[in-house]
Amino acid sequence: MSQQINRKPIGNFFIKKSLQLRLILKIVLASLVSTILSSGTLILVYYLKYKTVIVYQLDKISQELSREHIVYLILPTLLISSIVSILVSVGVGLYASRKYAVPVYKLEQWASLLRMGKMSALLRFREKEEMAELSNACNQLSSEMRERFVKIRTQSELLKQSSPSSPIAEEIEKVLSGLELETVPIEVSTTFYSVNPVNPAEQKK
């Protein structure tokens, strides 16, 4: 059985909508600025070379020269380039934002599980090579915390056996009562927005 967390899916893609939209917007703006700067550089180079921004064109039919400002000549190309840049940057932004948002989401949910007392929370990413050090460090942290709490509970039980009315043992028991120390390891899933129990055999892989 999977334990549902308090999160409803917003589409099949945007797992952290505001974060992803901000990243996409930044990528699109960077692409547009790059296109505009490239066009401006082209005009500047032309001006420095020819000392003018006027271009003379020969009409093939009338054989007459016409004057055109270089801006009007490159404007159609600039518009097409801008549209292509926007489309490409949106695609790149969607992919990059998803790759960036999923680890952030999983980290948040993993930390949330620990705050809820689920000390067997397991953090795992699809990007095993890139995120291996982070996931190993987080899982080691939760494992060490769990082991220490188990030792504290064991010592508390021994103290309670030797002194049934010990107030210290009672206080320790109250603190540990909100912790789940011996449950099956659970892993945050982004597919169904739930917390899935992990098979112990899979955890050893």
Image: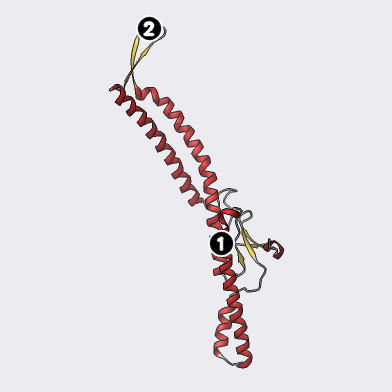
The front one of 192 and 74 is: 74
Picture quarter containing residue 193? Answer: bottom right
How packed mark 2 is, by other alpha carbons closer than 10 Å (few <14, some 14-19, many 20 or more), is: few
Picture quarter containing residue 192? Answer: bottom right
Q: Any mark on residue 93, and which?
A: none
Residue at the far top in the pictured view: 62
Amino acid on which the number 1 mark rests in the picture: Gln
Q: In this view, does 96 lie above or below 48?
A: below
Which structural element holds mark 1? helix
- Which residue is depicted at the point 53% across and 40% down? 91
Image quadrant containing the N terminus: bottom right
Q: Do the residues labelled 1 and 2 touch (CB within 8 Å)?
A: no
Image quadrant containing the C terminus: bottom right
Q: Which x, y percent locates residue 34?
A: 41, 37
Residue at the far left in the pictured view: 51
Q: Is residue 151 above or below residue 48?
A: below
Q: Distance between the residues labelled 1 and 2?
A: 72 Å
- Which residue is depicted at the point 58% across and 48% down? 13
Observer-side mark, 1 or 2, equals: 2
| Mark closest to the chain's N terminus, 1 or 2 | 2
What residue does disc 2 label?
63
Picture quarter containing residue 176? Answer: bottom right
Q: Which x, y percent locates residue 108?
A: 53, 61
Amino acid on which the number 2 mark rests in the picture: Gln
The front one of 85 and 177 is: 85
Q: Which x, y percent locates residue 67?
A: 32, 16
What residue does disc 1 label?
109
Task: Report the label total.
Answer: 2
How is the rendered protein coloured? secondary structure
Q: Which x, y percent locates residue 150?
A: 61, 78
